[in-house]
Every structure is written in C-alpha cells, then in structure tokens.
Amino acid sequence: MCCPGCEAIAGNIVELGMESYYKHRQITASATSQGEIIPDFLQQQELWNEESIQQQYVRKISHPADASDGQQFRAITLMISGITCAACVWLIEKQLQTSTGISKSTVNLSSQLAEVEWDTTKTSLSDILHSIHKIGYRAEPYSPKKQETLIAKENKQALSRIAVAGLGTMQVMMLAGGLYLGAFQGIATEHAHFLRWVSAIICIPVYFFSGAPFIQGAIRNIRTRHAGMDIPISIAISAAFFASIWSVITHGQEVYFDSVCMFILFLSVGRYLEMRARHRSLISTIRLAHSTTLMATLIIDDGTQKNVLAEHLLPGDRVLIKPGDTIPGDGEIIQGTSSINESMLTGEELPVPKSIGSMVTGGTVNVEHPLTVIIQHSNKDSVLNALQLLLEKAQSHKPKITLLADKVSRYFVLSVLLVSIAVYLTWYSIEPSSAFWITLSVLVITCPCALSLATPAAITSSVSTLANLGFLTPNQRFSESLHKTTDIVFDKTGTLTSGDFRIADSYLYPNVGLTYETASNIAAQLESHSGHPIASAFTHLSTTNLSPPLENITTHNGLGIEAQQHNTHYFIGSFAFVTRHLNPKPIDEALEGQWVWLSSDENLLARFKIEDSLREDSPQLIDFLHSQNYQLHILSGDNSSHPQKIAHTLGIDRVISGASPSDKLNYIQSLQQQDKTVLMVGDGLNDAPVLAAANCSISMANGADLTKRAADGLLLNHKISALVDIFNIVYKTNTIIKQNLTWALAYNACALPAAALGWVPPWLAAIGMSTSSLIVVLNALRLKSSVTNNAEQGSS
C-alpha cells in the first residue's frame, strides 16, 4: 500500500464484497513498490479455493462427533509469518476460533505452523487466510521448500537489523563517551549540542529499522486490544527515543540514545539466537521433506523409459530405481535384488536387504543394484507424507502446562505495565531524575518471553529429537501420560518377537483328496487376505492362482479366515475355528508350539507349525523397565505355549495367551479399573481398539498401515530397545519443562524488585531479559546433545 489510509480503505472494500472495483477501475494508484498489491493479493487468495491447487495441501478428515449431515471437513497446515511471542499465538488462535466454519485451530510458537480444520460448507480457505491477514500476519499453505526459503530470509533480515543496531550502538556510545567526560571535565555547550544531534541522527535508523519488529508487534497488539510482550519493550525504547529527541530539540541536557541503541541491539541479538535455536528444531521436518525426489524413471508398457515428475506417479506405475537413486514412492519390488538405506525412516544407517516382493518406502535410497518397483500409493498417501503430517501435528499440539503458561504470561504483561506506572510515580516523588531510567529497566527486564518459551521450546526440541531416533508422537498425550504409567502391556507378536514368521513343520491329513501343493496353495491364498504378521509365513507357498478363484472371503479377527470355491468352503486359523462346523468334531491334538489349521466343509486338510524368534534387544528393554519398577504384562492372541516361554525367558510374570481383541480390551480396562495407568505396546495391525483404550500406546509401525494407527507413538526404528532412549527423552522433556518454568518465574521474581529499587541500569536490563530467554532455549536443546552423547558412547 502507498499509505496506511489506502490499506484501510482497501480492507473496507474487501469486507463489503466490492472486490470487483479493482476489475473495473481505469486509473490505478501511482506506482510504489507495492502499488499493485491489492488486486494481486485478492486474486492470489481466491486461487487457493481452486480444487486442483488445494489437492497438494488440503487433507480430508472425518466428521467430528457433533457434525451434521452434509458437512465436509478439511484440514491444512499453514506457515505464519510475523509471530514473535505467545501473545501472537493467542491472538491468531482467537481470531480463527471465532471465525465461522472453523472447528479447530492450534498455532505453535516455535515452528510458527498452524493446524486448521474447517467446514467447507461454511467457509473457504481464502477466507481463513484473509482472516489471519486482517490482524497483521501473513499465512500460506505449508511447503518445506518455501519454509526453508523463509528461514533463510528471516535469518538475513535479522542479521541486517543486528548489523545496523551494532554499528549505531558503537557510534552512539563513542559520542556518549564525549558527553559523559564533558559532564565532569567541562565541554562547550555548542559542542555538546552537536554531539546530541549526531547521536539522534545515528539512532533514527536503529529505532525505525532495527527496532521495527518490536514496534510493529506492539502496534498489532494495541490494535487487537491484547497485552503482548512487545508492548512493554516498545514503550521503553519509544519513551527513551522520543524523550531524547524532544530534549535535543529543546536544548535539554538528558538524552538516552545510547540506552535505546543498546536496548535494541541486545534484544535483537537475543531474539536472533532464539530464532536460530528454533530453526534447528525445524530441521527434522525439512530434512524429511527433502528425502523426496523430484524426478522418476517411468517404465511404459512397451518397455521404453520416460522421465516424469515423482508427484505425478499413480498406483500401478512401474519405475526403474538405479543405484544411488531416491525411491520416488511407496511400492513393491517386482524385479531385482538390492539393499536400501532407510536412515531417513528409522535412523539406522546400515542398509536393509530387499528382494522381489519386498516393500520399499518413498524417500529411502537404493544402494547397490537396479530395481523395478510398482507404485502402490500416490505421493499424497505415501508413508513419507504421513510422517510429515504426524511430525507437524506433534509440534502443533499444546499440553495443558503450555496453556497455563500462556495464560499466566498474558496477565503478567498487564501486571508489568501497572507496576511500571507505580514505580515511576514512586521514584518521581523520591528522586525525579532517576524515575525515567528506572521505569525503563522495569519495563524491559520483566518481559515474560522466557515464560512463554519454556514449554514450546522443550516440546519442539523433544519432537525433533525423537524423530531423529525413528519415533513419532502424533499426540502429545503420550509424553504427558508416560510419566504416570504403572503397567506396560506387550502384544508379543512383532514387538518382543521379531515378527518374521516361518513354517517350521507341516502335515497333510490322509484321504482328503488334495495334494500337499494344492492344500498349501489354498492356505496361502486365504492368508493373503489377512493383516496378521503370521500371514507372511505363507507367502512363498502361493505357486499359482487358484482356478476358479476364492470368493466370499470373510476375515474373523483373532480367529481365522473363511472363503468359498465352487460349493466348497475353506477355513484357516485356530483349531477351534476351523473345526467348529465339523461333525463329529475332531479331538484337539494339543501339539507343542504354534499351529495353523486348514479345513474344508467336511475334513481337516492340513496343519502348519509357525515359529517366531525373540528380538535380540528385547532383554535389554525388559531389564530397563524392571529397573524402573514397572509392572509388565504379555497379552497375546497366540494360544500355544510360546507366550509363556517368551515370558519366562524375559522374566515377565503376567501372561495372557489366546486372547481375542475383545479379551485384550477387557484386560486393559480391568487394569484401569484398579487405578492403573497403562501403556500398551503392540504391532498396531489388529489391536487398534486396545491401543486406543490404553492411557498411552506405542505401535511398531510398518509402512502400509502407518496411517491407520490408533497409537500415541509410532516406532519406525527396527530396534525395540530404542524405547529405552525414548523413555529417557520423554522423562527429560518433562524435567526440562519444569526447569524452564521454574527459571522463568524465579528470574522475574528476582529481577522485578531489583529493577524497581534502581539496582539495574537499562542496558543491563536488556541483557538480562535476552539472556533469560536464551537460557530457556539452550536448556531445551540439551535434549539433542544428550542423545548425541549417548550415541557416541554406544558406538565407542
């Protein structure tokens, strides 16, 4: 806009629905650097309503419980520019929550990302962006590349402001030295006046350029009638600046240009260091996004190859992955054998062998030999995209302690303003010459920046540190509940055991009219429709497609699968399940180990012995949990003696085997009725109700089912012993939050009386406030350094 008046008029035109004015006007405003911004801005916001553009950013979500028929809900992650403190976060959230059609909104101070959910029948994406713009912030859909550009821009601009403030401070301090010496040794009046004028000229760019973020933040807070942290800072530097300008004009003796420049320099350096620490915590999200590749080699039906954009790949497309290439999307290997670097997914640098039939994840890297992969998920539905959404959601979540800190900080600002007025009046009656600078010190030293950063800094650092270890917490309920946990329940398969099943033995019953190959093929075809890890043991038994194919396939959770071929029904699963229809009913042979039976309408056909091995690192985890005095349980659907053997090996006393999903749910609920706080650790495939029912839960996540998890935490790392580090980090996060809040409150409790008594000069107040905030951020970053140190010790 060429001036604030134009901006105000343009806002009224937009709010009155008269945007078409810009399409019909014949004379435009005189050219300025932003002379044409109004029509461009309107057109750009309207473009976000285009379905084709929204596909890349907007997600469809399920209806809330209280939603009515016909409502269509969407969700998006927004980047917001201009956030400087918790007051900004509160203001944006309040603006969104009071807007029509928005069902949920959360803003994270550290990442400056907002999660917004809305009803498309009541509002649009452009309306949401415009409502944020009206209160002085700029919002746009989240893009990792765009965020990286904004980080670089923010860093460059902050350094420019520091440079101007630093140069100005050095020059003004040099001139102030002459004035101070002149006050004791004598100086000509015209010389002193000249030095004050030069100081004023040097201070002007420092105030208006380097101090702009503080002034703009304060103006925004005043316009929205909210007491933000920039208000006391801006009052202090503005009062000192304009009082000094007035003193120069009226030939007064007292000027504070040196204090103004030092204020702005120290505050700018403090905020810059906080910003850099915040950027470090965002690296995990950006690094994850950069794991995607732009181009892919598509294999066309006639065998020719074509380079295409990876985001245009569709399920069913075949792509060639050369050694060193990044895999462009989730898929299955249909040709070739190689090893894959999955460090971006699991944190482990050692490549994982892959062959025909193996699943690969987009963003991982092919190390050795060429592969042909058939794409199974579009870019939007990929595991990598799901990981990004989970990471963003984790960083945007606010635990209860954060909400309390934000509320306290808002009231604290109002209290500081009232105390400052009282301090000024008191000192003016005692020693008028000291009242002004003492009040400046009170305004600056008590800014509650540290209090507002205490929890967000720790949460953001924790989330990114856990992500580097291959663990994601989509819901912060996990870290809030874990320290209260009394009982930990494991689902044996795929958690304490490796989940790599194999058929160790098999038996074909006599006189069933089938060959072993046919019976094995039927079993494999039935198991191919199961989501249970045991089904993987039958994959190699499927030699040819059945003719005619199986029909009317029905899965009975925790029991087995049935299907029909011609007039014959086939059943596979537990002994009780496959024999319940047989008459006379066979006698259970009570065989040692874990067996799967196959039957038809009339006979038992075959049985298969399934074996699974204990994870090598399970004893390490269990020993750690025993040392922490947790009550441990194994809750397994396996009705053999295998769960008891695993429990005996690990030293776990409480074992329930042969449990159906409903049995598991009842067991969890019975523990909770005894006032137990339960953590459930499962494979996440058939235990969604149990994972959701537990106070907190961890799922051993694996590719295709990642987006279906009901757990609070997803372990992407193949090592279950990684939970030891995860437990420690969550505990340290809670400790650091308490330390940060204690420090912030103690600092303000001590600093306020000291400043009010006149013991703290203005320049020291600025250093104190910046140092207080910096201590909070650096304390949060100790999480990252502790993990690095542990990793180095483990490798030595």
Image: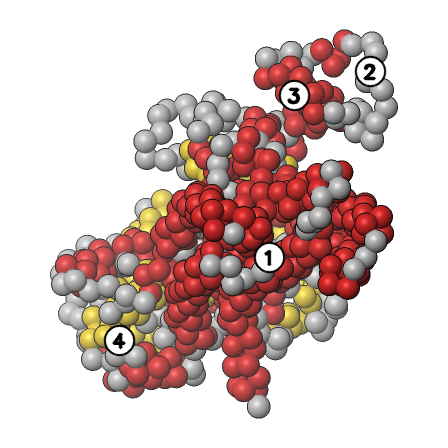
Tag 3 residue: 8
The answer to which of 296 and 45 lies nearer the viewer is 45
Tag 4 residue: 630
Local SS, label 3: helix
Mark positioned earlier in the residue sequence (4 or 2)? 2
- The tally of labels here is 4
Three-letter code for the amino acid on which mark 4 is drawn: Tyr
Gap in angstroms between the C-alphas marked 4 and 2 = 72 Å
Image vertical order of residue 609 relative to residue 201, above or below: below
Which residue is drawn at the image coordinates 44% and 29% (left, top)?
98
Q: Can residue 654 be seen in this view?
A: yes
Which residue is drawn at the image coordinates 28% and 65% (left, top)?
484
Quadrant where the C terminus sits is bottom right
Q: Which mark is residue 28?
A: 2
Q: Which mark is residue 762?
A: 1
Q: Position of residue 460 (x, y in %)?
A: 51, 59
Which residue is drawn at the image coordinates 47% and 47% (left, top)?
429
